[in-house]
Image (cartoon, rainbow, N blue to C red):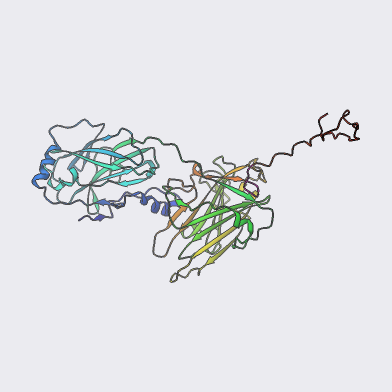
Amino acid sequence: MRSVSSFCRAPEASRTGRARAAALSAFLLLVPAALSSGCVEQDDDRPSEDDMKVVKQNLLSAAPAPKSAVNADLDGKLVFLGADWEPAEAEPGKDIRLTQYWKLVASPGDGWRLFTHLEGPNHQGFVNADHGPVGGKYPVSQWKPGEIIRDQHTVTLPSNWPAESVQVYVGAWRGQTRMPPKSGPNDGNGRVLAATIPVKRQAPPPRKRYVARKVTGPITIDGKLDEAAWKAAPSTGAFVNTMTGAPAGPDTQAKLLWDDKFLYVAFLNADTDIWSSLGKRDDKLWTQEADELMIDADGNGRGYIELQVAPNGNLFDTYLPQYRKYEDSLDPKRKPYSWNSKANVKVTVDGTLNKHDDQDRSWTVELALPLEDVKGLDSAAPAPRLPPQLGDVWRLNMFRMDMPQGKGQQAVGWSPPLVGDFHALDKFGELAFGDENGTLTPPPAPAPEAKPEGTGGKPGKAGKHGHKKKATEAP
């Protein structure tokens, strides 16, 4: 019977800002269903006679020469000699054949087990590849001093693997303890870096794009979305897992419109438990439930705005002159989050706000953002041009944080950043400005008027039928 130690799971990624809790929750979705994020306990039963036949084939008489030679000393008890792998480049959605080489120096005592973790640089993606050594036939408790053990196993790299390499970490654990590495490359958290495997690059997915339709009539900001323009506006489609891009709940969609004065944004949020206890402007709405909008209008990766709306209608807004630098980076006298937009926001709730003992249905955000607000504190910036022209493109992203009672926070996004940071500006989608039908280019100018049949004479003079040519007609 297998069980899981909470200690042996991968260490929490170094998240930043509001993405921390939500991104970790999404991050753990990568773990195969048969495994948890912890190290998986293996059966400690004594090997059978048939098991030992397989084991003997994997006991080496001499130290190997692996592609990745490590020779990490774990507390003077175990030495991780190194690793081989096939194929040379890992490919998302396909198997990696890992071969690990261990040497027992001295018996570590009962209860020790091995773990194998796969993850990308900066904690992009995670796979728990724990298994019993030699196909589960030779537990560590049965190893004998001086033995060199070859352990081969196969791991499938998730098809949505986000990183350009796979870092393989190994080690030994018992209860709440990892055997400490005394030498060799390690992460400082009891994990030895066994190998770094390049990932075969795939063509990046196409950038998300939404064409906002231009409205010609008034939009009343009341959270109802009952104007014909809202009903005709296409949906973004359901937001997705921020770490993987896979389908994920809670169901969230958005719509956008525009005119010469405002960008209109609507969020439609399915929610069975709608709540918010944060009532002051610029409270940390990302710690509870909120919709989030970031706009880098000129797409230069600098100077962007961020707005969040809670179910109670509260607003958070800030201007960032550079990636993750707030207003105080421009002037020490300013405080972070001190820039205020002129956004008009209304929220409607289909359910009961802040009542946890019933079943709610949804909440809807309707927001009108003055176009000049996209420049934040840099009102003199030459780009973007305001109002936009047909076919102009801005960069933006949208997210939703949800926290049902008694559960951890969940997050979904429109254009998934694929890392634990919603401020991944290079992953922002595109907002294109179209006409009332979503067309990006204006219609062609009318063709010159054709010359009527039977006319003659010179330009500007009457023909024999008394017709005088117009200046636009061909002579």
Magenta stretch, overall SS? loop
Provide residue 19's location: percent of width, then percent of height: 45, 51
Q: How many marks?
A: 0
Q: Is residue 436 magenta?
A: yes
Q: Measuring 28% from the left and 53% from the top, which residue is drawn there?
A: 7
Examine the rendering and report whether any part of residue 373 can be seen: no
Q: Which quadrant is the N terminus positioned in? A: bottom left
Would you place residue 7 above or below residue 100 in this image? below
Provide residue 77's location: percent of width, then percent of height: 17, 43
Q: Measuring 57% from the left and 56% from the top, which residue is drawn there?
A: 266
Q: Which quadrant is the C terminus positioned in? A: top right
Q: Is residue 71 magenta?
A: no
Left or right? Give the position of 243 relative to 285.
Answer: left
Q: Residue furthest left?
A: 49
Would you place residue 470 above or below residue 313 in this image? above
Q: Nearer the viewer, residue 349 or 178?
A: 349
Left or right? Give the position of 417 relative to 374.
Answer: left
Q: Nearer the viewer, residue 39 or 380?
A: 39
Give the image quarter of residue 191: top left
Examine the rendering and report whether any part of residue 401 can be seen: yes
Left or right? Give the position of 208 relative to 447.
Answer: left
Provide residue 315's location: percent of width, then percent of height: 56, 59
Left or right? Give the position of 350 relative to 77.
Answer: right
Q: Measuring 13% from the left and 45% from the top, which residue is drawn there?
A: 107
Provide residue 227's location: percent of width, then percent of height: 63, 60
- The magenta stretch spans which residues? 434-440
